[in-house]
Image: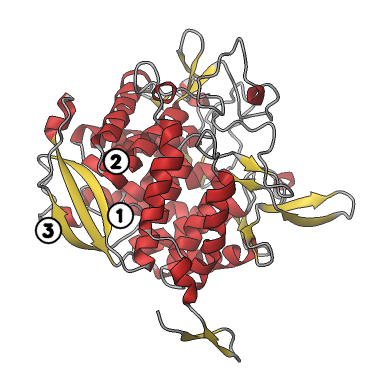
Amino acid sequence: MPNEIINKSSEELVLKDQKWITSFPKGERWQRHLKEDLLPFWTNKDALGEPIGNFPTYRADDGTVVNINNLPTEFQNVIPGIVFLDRDYVRAKSRQIFAYGVAYHMTGDEKYLVYAKAGVDYLFKYALDDYGACSWFKLPDRTPSPNPMQRTSQDLAYAVSGIAFYYYLTRDKKIEKKILELKNYIFETYWDEGIDMLKWVVEPNQDKDSPDQKELVSQLDQIYGYLLLLAPSLPLDEQRKAKKELQRLAWVIIKHFFVKRYGLFWGSVTTTERKRLDTSHTDFGHSVKTMWMIMQIGKLTNNLELFNFGRNGAVDIINLAFNPIKKIWMKGYKKNSIIKKWIMDFDKEWWAFTILDQVAATLSLNDPDYAEMLIYTYSFWFKYMVDQKNHGVWHMLEGKTNLPSPGFPKQHSWKNAFHTFEHALIGYLCSQAIHNLDINLYFAFEKDFDPKTQENRKRIHPYFYQAAMKEIDVSRKFRGKKKFLKNLVKTRVVFSDLR
């Protein structure tokens, strides 16, 4: 790629050397990461559950299921709020469905589709009800819990996420019907005109959640967990409704949570005391994810105001979060009690790291400067964030040592496969695009969904992005004996010009 002149400031033009592109990984590196680093941890017998599809919430760092009568070291002194050994979480199972869906999407290996479908079937049979979905199964008797009005809107969003990805792959009509019922239930039950947003809970619960809470993730995770993926995938009439809901949520978030002074979003606006830089969900990860979602909503709905707000905000946060000396992402702000000032937090938390990478990768589709950042952050991810011995990805690395922080198991109620597999997928998509290479993705459309009709072609897209469709290959066949495979057509779609 030749050097080019870029506008560094209003007064200075500099020549930008683009030799970096020879060091930037291609999509094959992400395929290898998926197969060698991620899947070994998520496809052993313990990960798949008993029966397959009943994916366990907790596993030790070596991949074995946690024995509550003989806890592994990493589960003996965990930080509060991430481990409840008497609960088997629905959101964890749904996130694992998502991961197997991504694995099939990137490789075309049907066994991952079988695992995803097993998880979908388990949730349909045991977790979904007339009130959306339970949040967890209370152990040991596996009672669906808590009471319907005590479930958080965020838990409901992530109960949908894995099922929504399976629908994105298949366009299964039965799945579509249930997803729309779930979406409508969430908006009908949790939307509060008085506070102009989705509530956190309708009734107080045992976790001390309260109906007066005003949480960013109540709104944001409806977008991120399922709605942005679904909106262009649905039939035309439902697309219109979903796009309106996306725009409404975007404006709610900007109106109530954006802090212009910092260019960030408050994680909660329930009380004045919650509006601080060190409170839960006020960090670079949540804020840049929010900007990214707003940018993508603007792009999807042709709303230039939303697109510009999201893109400009994402650029500001990415530039703030990247340390140019250490060439690594920073987590956010933290209070230094000695000097009594806000300082940068250099700890690396897995999910925030993936989001910062993904947003930078998205921005790099138009501005290669962000791809240069990723050469360093990707290298760090592969070297340090991956458990080189037992596979999978660490929860947190300490900023000073780059070693795993004690108190954070590799898999728990909030840490499953979702973010790391999404990271691999977006890494693959954007790396191929940056190198001007074709993007190959596998779908498994229902037989009555013809991907070659004009209307249905518009419903096929690469995850959160749009692209040109170069080829649709329906010549491949599923070889497995599972009954549901007989109703699906293995389809390889080749995309280019990702945007």
Name the residue tied to disc 3.
Answer: 454
Q: Amino acid at mark 2?
A: Tyr
**Vertical placement of residue 131 versus 470, above or below:** above
- In this picture, residue 56 sits left or right of residue 302: right
Give how far apart the Cα atoms at labels 2 and 3 are.
25 Å
Alpha-carbon neighbours of circle 2 within 10 Å: few (<14), some, or many (≥20)?
many
Cα separation between marks 2 and 1? 14 Å
- Disc 1 marks which residue? 462
Q: Amino acid at mark 1?
A: Pro
Quarter-of-image position of residue 380: bottom right
Q: Quadrant of the C terminus?
A: bottom left
- Nearest to N terminus: mark 2 or mark 1: 2
Residue at x 60%, y 30% (from the top left corner): 409
Residue 104 x, y percent position in the rendering: 29, 40
- Per the image, the residue denoted by label 2 is 104
Q: Can you tell which of label 2 and label 3 is closer to the viewer? A: 2
Three-letter amino acid code of the residue under disc 3: Gln
Q: Nearer the viewer, residue 497 or 392?
A: 392
